[in-house]
Structure formats: C-alpha cells, structure tokens
Amino acid sequence: MQYSANWWREKLQLQSHVEGGAFRETYRSEWMLDMSTLPAGMSGNRNASTCIYFLLEYGEFSAFHRIAADEIWHFYDGTTLTIYEVEPGGNLITHKLGRDIDKGESLQVIITAGNWFASRTEVPGGFSLTGCTVAPGFDFADFELADRSALQAAYPQHTALIGELTR
C-alpha cells in the first residue's frame, strides 16, 4: 500500500520544524547523563537518547544546522533523501538515505557530532519519511542553525549549495 506525505503527517501527528519539514518526538530516555560525562560543547545534563519522525516533501529542505551529538537517520517510506554533510575541514559528504541499496542508498546514515548538515528530497513530487535518533539526547541548547553568510565564508567551495539550503 502506498501512502502520501499528507497521510503520514496526519497519522503521525507531525508538526512544523524550525529547520524545515515536519516532525514529532517519539522517545526521550528517562535516563539522564550528568554533564561531567558528556562531550565538550554540551552544557547541562542530557537524556541518554531521543528519537523523532521527520518528513520532508519535494520543494522543502532541512536547512544547514549542527548539533553537539551524533545523529542516526533511518529511512521509513517515500523517495530517497539526500543529506549533505560538511566536515570541519570542508569535505562534503553526500549521503543517500533510501532503500535502493543497489544504487548506493543506505537505510541508515550517521552524521557526526558538530558537522554541518542539511537535507532534501530531489525527486519531483516525492517525500521522505525518516527517523532520527540522537545520543546523548537532543536538546535545543545544542542546536545551531547556520547563518548563510558565515557558512559560505567558512566553506566557499560550497557557496551554491549553502545558498540553496539555508534560510
């Protein structure tokens, strides 16, 4: 059976996300990690793990942002999601999150803590229903939405892509 983006948005009760697309948190671990055990860049205690549903439709994008923890993306339904990850040295990694393993897609993609990343579905009329697991758990205190000019100045080799995927 084929489902639409609207069907998923309604059934999963997804809400607009500040970075673009729609989401709903589905899990927040009750286990708390003391800040003394956490990596640099995190201030305060954190839940051990969090998980969300995340939906993007063609024409939308998740703007470049970074967080202080590793993020694992999971593919659920729809069309391939392209995730662009920029490492600190400027290397661009293009991930294809999807189910066509023979075409180099992956059912799971890991984004390294502190790297800038953005995503979009590039299939006209398509959508991507995914999930994201973050450990230590996501907290907006660890979230930074990119400033277009500053990111382009830091990574001039990716000026066009940054221009397309920032607000």
Image (cartoon, rainbow, N blue to C red):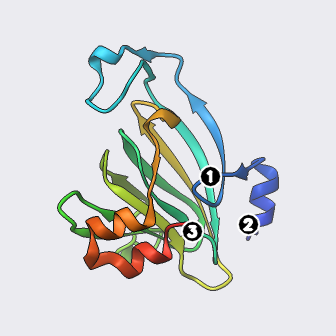
Q: Residues within 10 Å of mark 3 (few under 14, many from 20)?
A: many
Between discs 2 and 3, the one toward the N terminus: 2
Q: Which residue is mark 2?
A: 5
Q: In the image, is residue 152 above or below residue 50? A: below
Do the numbered discs 2 and 3 sit on residues whose CB atoms are within 8 Å?
no
Q: Position of residue 100 (x, y in %)?
A: 45, 74
Residue 135 is left or right of residue 7, and the answer is left
Q: For mark 2, does the 10 Å Cα neighbourhood hold few (<14), some (14 to 19), or many (20 or more) residues?
A: some
Q: Position of residue 163 (x, y in %)?
A: 45, 76
Identify which residue is drawn at 55% across, 50% down.
131
Q: Residue furthest left?
A: 89
Instruction: Name the residue tied to disc 1.
Output: 18
What residue is shown with label 3?
61
Label 3: which secondary element: loop
Left or right of 161 on screen, residue 86? left
> Which three-letter amino acid code belongs to the residue tagged 2?
Ala
For residue 159, what is the image quadrant? bottom left
Helix, strand or loop for disc 2? helix
Front-most of 150 and 15? Answer: 150
Q: Residue at x 40, y 60 (%)?
A: 117
Query: Quick one: label 1 or label 2, which is nearer the N terminus?
Result: 2
Please give the count of numbered marks on the rendered protein: 3
Is any atom of residue 83 visible in this view? yes
